[in-house]
Image (cartoon, coloured by chain):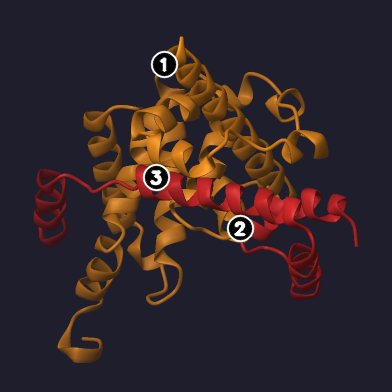
Amino acid sequence: MAEDGKSRRELFEEEVMEFIDGLYGYALHLTRNPEDACDLVQETYARAFKAQEQYTLGTNARAWLFAILRNTFLNQIRSASRRPKEVQCDWVDELPHHGVEEIRKFGPDPYDQFLNDLLREDIEKALDELPEPFKSAVVLCDVEGFSYKEISEILGVPIGTVRSRIHRGRSHLRKRLERWYEKREGEKKA
Amino acid sequence: MSCAFVHSNIHDFISGELGEEDRRRFENHLHECASCRSCVNNMSMLRNRLGDLLRSRAPGHLRDRLVVRGKA
C-alpha cells in the first residue's frame, strides 16, 4: 500500500486517467476518425497498464502516455502495410520556411475578425494538408502545450527537428488559413 | 537589435522556449517596434485560437470502458 491507503495500481490509474481528453484529441488528429481514435486510446491504456512497472509514479505520465499512443499508432500503420507519410518523403526540406518579408505582411486585416471566423473544421482541414511529422509537432505544442524537449521525447527526434517542424508547420497553417479567409471574403464581396 | 532577430525567433518566443537573455532582448525590441509587436500578437493569437478550437473531450463511453478495464 502506498500513501493515503491507496495501492500503487490505484495511484497509477488516477494519474494516467487524467490525460484521457488530450490523448483522445491527439488520437483523433492521427486517425481522423472518432471510432479509430477510441480504439487507439484504449490500446494505449492497455499497453500503459501492462507496462506500469516501468513508470515511476509522479514523473511525466502525460509525455509517457503520448509516446505510447504515437508508437502504437505507427505500429498499427506498419502492420496494415500502410507506410506513414513521414518515411515517404523528406518534407522538412520541401516545406518552405517563410522569410522576414512573408511575416511582415502578416495576415488578413482585421485580424480579430479572421480569428473569430475560424472554425474547427477549417483548422482541421488545414492541418490535414500538413505531412504527419509537422502536424504532430504543432498539435503537441500548440494544443497540448508540451515543451520542445517533451515533444522530442514523444516523437523520438532531436529538439532542433522539433523546432523546425513547429516553425514550418505553423507558418504553413497560418498561410493556408489566411488564403482561405481572403478567398472567402473575396467571394462575399463579389 | 533588429527586426530580423524577432522574425527568426518568433516561434520559439511564442512557444515559451527562448532563453531568458534572448527573451529579454526580444521583448525589448517589441516595446520599440510596432510592426514586430503586431506580428507577434497575431501569431500568438492564432496559436491560442488553434488550442481553443482543437481541444477535444473523450466520449463518455470510452472513459467508462477504460475505467472498467483498469479495475479488472
Identity, as a three-letter code, of the amino acid under mark 1:
Lys
Instruction: Give the letter of the chain under mark 3.
Output: A
Give percent across and percent down for residue B68.
8, 55
Give the labeled residue for mark 1: A188
Question: Which lettered chain is shown in orange?
Answer: A
Assign the C terminus of chain B to one quadrant of the image.
bottom left
Disc 3/disc 1 C-alpha distance (Å): 42 Å
Residue at 45% x, 68% y is A60
Q: Mark 2 vs mark 3: same chain?
A: no
- Give the residue type at disc 3: Leu
| Label 3 CA crowd tier, 10 Å (few <14, some 14–19, many 20+) | many
Q: Is residue A99 visible?
A: no
Please give the label number shown on residue A48: none
Instruction: Say the numbered circle drawn on residue B15.
Output: 2
Local secondary structure at mark 2: loop
**In the image, residue B16 lies at what x, y percent?**
62, 64
Residue at the spot 40% in from the left edge and 65% down from the top edge: A61
Q: Which mark is residue A69?
A: 3
The mark closer to the camera, 1 or 2, is 1
**Residue at 21% of width from left, 86% of height from top?**
A1
